[in-house]
Image (spheres, rainbow, N blue to C red):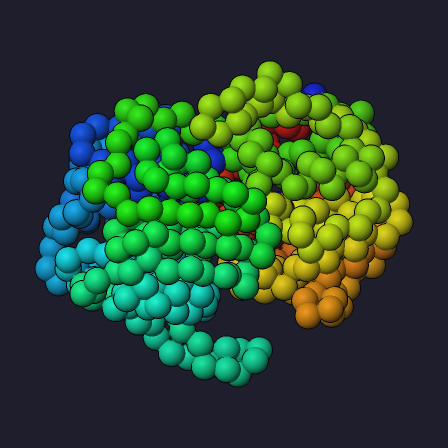
Amino acid sequence: MYVIKPISKIKKKITVPPDKSISHRAVILSSLCEGKTRIEPFVESQDTKATLECMKKLGITANLSDGLLTIIGTGMSLKPQETPLTLFANESGTTMRILSGLLSCQKFPVTFEAAPALCRRPMGRIILPLQQMGARISGTTAKDKITHEEKLYPPLHIKPAGEIKGQRFKLNVASAQVKSALMLAALFAKGQTVIKEPYKSRDHTERMLKLFRAGIKVKGTTITCKPINKLVSPKKLFIPGDFSSAAFFIVLGLIIKKSKITIKNVNINPTRCGLLQVLKRMGGKIKIKNKKSAYEPYADIVVQSSELKGAEVKPEEIPSMIDEVPILCVAAAFAKGKTEIRGVKELRVKETDRIWSMVHNLSIAGVDIYNARYKDDEEIVINGGKTYRAYSFESFFDHRVAMSMIIFSMALAHRESDIDDTDCINKSFPRFLSIVKSLYR
Ligand code: S3P
């Protein structure tokens, strides 16, 4: 159990860990190059460690020392270190989904296992399109708890395919993991692959593939990917701070009176920063300073205490803030008036059902929050700006729910709250609690 005290007047400059999504991709693409790539900074969170451990079993040499990760890749043909090969994605959906695209095009069979929390998350979304490309990939069938339909889950079994063929895909979910799995398979395919998303999801794979000189073109929500024999390493890769981790302190700085928080060197890729636009509409005082452009843009984000008001969030904005909806619910609880967050049904299949987890936690603290149907999707509605109770919250072992409820508890006027588990935070942000502690000094 972790106890959270209310906080006041924060004046602090902080840094957050390197971006988790970019780190996964940096490890994977560097592994596919011959020769050395230096990735810095690199933090072994539970998820990034899962990708690194898988790649080591696939033949790369990796050395991590003082935040500098050096990878010596295998080239496009991975070299498994054991037969039969079993890989373990632990709880990392990104590891399992993205790597499946790559493993489907290799010349060896693999069993891809996962921890129980990931075994509850759907894999049909990558299995079916990869099968369409000719991949011999299968999952484990089980009944969906809500719809009772038969669906595909981990573990996965992947066998060498005869031929991988380029295809045209029109995805019905905006998912960076799905499109990334398909883009990696497209590198090995015969003919080009075209992927169209309903709305643009995070584009880190596209940017990094360009950096590694793959034949990829992006026009709006359509990606065209050509096969390639060789990726070329940029030799050095800087990983900017994770916007999704910064988001907790962005909201904290806005909702605590007389505060100013600066977060240094944060990735400000527009496909990730939807939360900033929404918070600005809510009246948040947010400044972007020292902007730098590399393959990914990054900058310092400065936030100051603000009188927030409710706002409407449209479904097309959700992909650019998919992991930030829990902390947006916290901001909305402290904003005067109604916030409607529309098009959130994907939150049901994250580490937990995040609609349920956030509605449950915030409503027991007295927040007027509910979820409702919205067209063929769902919405969360919050009537904010009231006074709330401290409580014993539950993380449901979901890192972003735990961090969101800690930030909520810090902003309560009186009394301590507590939360049952904080170990789950290591999934993405191992230093979170030490930063929180430093803010009370
Ligand atoms: C991720 C994509 C998103 C996000 C996840 C990381 C990625 O998932 O929620 O935390 O690195 O590609 P979806 O692709 O399922 O939306």
Instruction: For the C terminus, give its image quadrant.
Output: top right
Question: Which of 126 and 215 lies nearest the eye of the viewer?
Answer: 215
Q: Which residue is farthest front? A: 191
**Rendering quarter of residue 29:** top left
**Rendering quarter of residue 438:** top right
**Taking 287 as reference, is 105 above or below it?**
below
Question: Which of 280 and 376 lies nearest the eye of the viewer?
Answer: 376
Question: Which of 126 and 256 lies nearest the eye of the viewer?
Answer: 126
Q: Which residue is farthest top? A: 290
Percent across and percent down for residue 273 are: 62, 38
Question: Which of 149 and 57 lies nearest the eye of the viewer?
Answer: 149
Name the residue rendered at 33%, 57% in the picture: 166
Percent across and percent down for residue 55 are: 24, 46
Name the residue rendered at 50%, 49% in the picture: 222
Q: Is residue 285 left or right of residue 132?
A: right
Name the residue rendered at 69%, 36% in the picture: 276
**Rendering quarter of residue 345:** bottom right
Name the residue rendered at 27%, 30% in the picture: 233
